[in-house]
Image: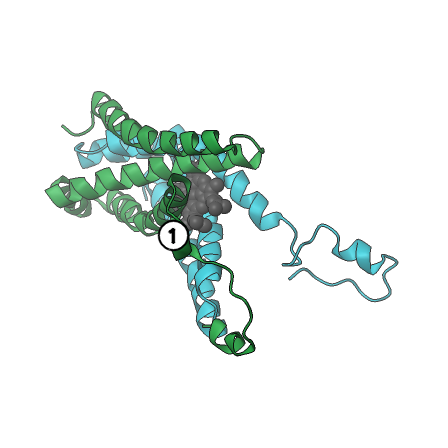
Chain colours: A cyan, B green
């Protein structure tokens, strides 16, 4: 829900709702899904090849490569954009299939908790690999 | 379900999925959603790997052992395929968003291309990773 303007606003009721659609939030959700999709194309190709090329190498080599600046930044971008994208995507899936209010809200909350936890944990691990604490 | 409450009013029902003859675009639309959900869960595997690498050689040996079992390899291959299939399906969505590729011939062709492309690219990506020193 977007914040409603005070009734003293000079804008007409029609002007206030135009372009906002049924969810009163405009196209932000849809647009961010597309924005993250475009960003994810190169990031995913890079991340998949990187991770697979590290399979079978010993721990020291993996730490050295994952901790190097360019790789760490690329991977950070990948996990952060992925977490936001999957949060948006799972929200749509839940809204499509779960119609009873309480389970729906619980699952939407769970989706947010999970996505934030994924983002934070991945960032922590990547930074630790870089800074070697 | 919500329908139970409203059906008393005898409203006409719109036809749902089971009514239609399955088409390629319909099946691959479902695949896009399923791969999206699989990737959502799959982040746990990526996290396990990253945390283990950050934690030290002993923890890393654990993931490495798992990923080298047959099950581990299959999961990794499926994960790669789901990622690439979802990526190509997503690119198809982006093309459709511009209004292109929606004709009856193009949309089927485009959809078929994502499937053929994802299988081909998965093999190519594994091969590139091998050339870069992976899987030895
Ligand atoms: C590789 C680049 C990717 C692209 C181009 C992409 C593209 C898209 C697009 C366009 C949608 C919206 C589909 C629609 O409106 O029906 C979508 C949905 C979704 N994506 Fe992605 N995606 C990518 C990677 C990922 C990753 C890495 C994850 C998970 C970690 C993910 C999880 C999801 C989920 C859960 C949905 C919701 C599925 C649905 O609504 O049916 N995607 N993706």
Q: x, y percentage for residue B18?
A: 38, 56
Screen quadrant of the C terminus of chain B: top left
**Relative to B67, A87 lies left or right:** right
User: Is B55 left, or right, of B12 in this rendering?
Assistant: left
Task: Establish if B96 lies above or below A83.
Answer: above
> Image quarter for residue B124?
top left
Quadrant into which the N terminus of chain B falls = bottom left
Q: Position of residue A119 (x, y in %)?
A: 41, 49
Quarter location, residue A16: bottom right
Q: Residue at x 19, y 48 (%)?
A: B59
Identify the image quadrant of residue A25.
bottom right
Residue plotted at (75% across, 52% down): A18
Circle 1 marks a residue in which chain? A
Q: Which residue appears at 66% of the width and 51% of the height?
A: A26
Q: Secondary structure at mark 1?
A: helix
Relative image position of residue B50 (x, y in whole percent): 29, 44
Rendering coords of residue A56 (x, y %): 16, 33
**Mark 1, residue position:** A118
Q: Nearer the viewer, residue A79 or B114?
A: B114
Query: Where on the image, by quarter, is ligand 1?
Result: top left
Residue found farthest to the top: B131
Q: Residue at x 74, y 63 (%)?
A: A4
Task: Work out whether residue A48 can be spotted.
Answer: yes
Q: Nearer the viewer, residue A80 or A1?
A: A1
Rendered view: B21 above or below A68: below
């Amino acid at each position: 829900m977007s914040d409603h303007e005070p009734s003293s606003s000079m804008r007409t009721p029609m002007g206030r709702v135009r372009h906002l659609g049924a969810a009163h939030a405009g196209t932000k959700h849809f647009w961010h899904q597309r924005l993250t999709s475009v960003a994810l194309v190169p990031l995913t190709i890079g991340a998949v090849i990187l991770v697979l090329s590290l399979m079978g190498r010993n721990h020291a080599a993996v730490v050295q490569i994952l901790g190097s600046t360019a790789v760490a930044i690329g991977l950070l971008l990948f996990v952060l954009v992925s977490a936001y994208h999957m949060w948006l995507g799972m929200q749509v899936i839940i809204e499509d299939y779960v119609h009873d209010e309480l389970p729906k809200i619980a699952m939407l909350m769970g989706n947010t908790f999970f996505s934030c936890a994924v983002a934070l944990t991945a960032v922590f691990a990547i930074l630790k690999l870089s800074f070697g604490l | 379900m919500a329908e139970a409450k409203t059906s008393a009013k005898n409203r006409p029902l719109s036809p749902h999925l089971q009514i239609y003859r399955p088409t390629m675009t319909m099946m691959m639309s479902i695949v896009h959603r399923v791969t999206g959900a699989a990737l959502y869960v799959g982040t746990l595997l990526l996290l396990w790997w990253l945390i283990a690498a950050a934690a030290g050689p002993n923890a890393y040996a654990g993931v490495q052992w798992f990923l080298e079992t047959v099950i581990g390899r299959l999961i990794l291959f499926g994960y790669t395929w789901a990622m690439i299939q979802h990526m190509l399906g997503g690119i198809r969505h982006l093309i459709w968003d511009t209004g292109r590729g929606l004709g009856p011939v193009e949309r089927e062709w485009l959809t078929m291309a994502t499937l053929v492309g994802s299988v081909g690219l998965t093999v190519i990506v594994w091969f590139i990773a091998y050339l870069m020193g992976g899987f030895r």
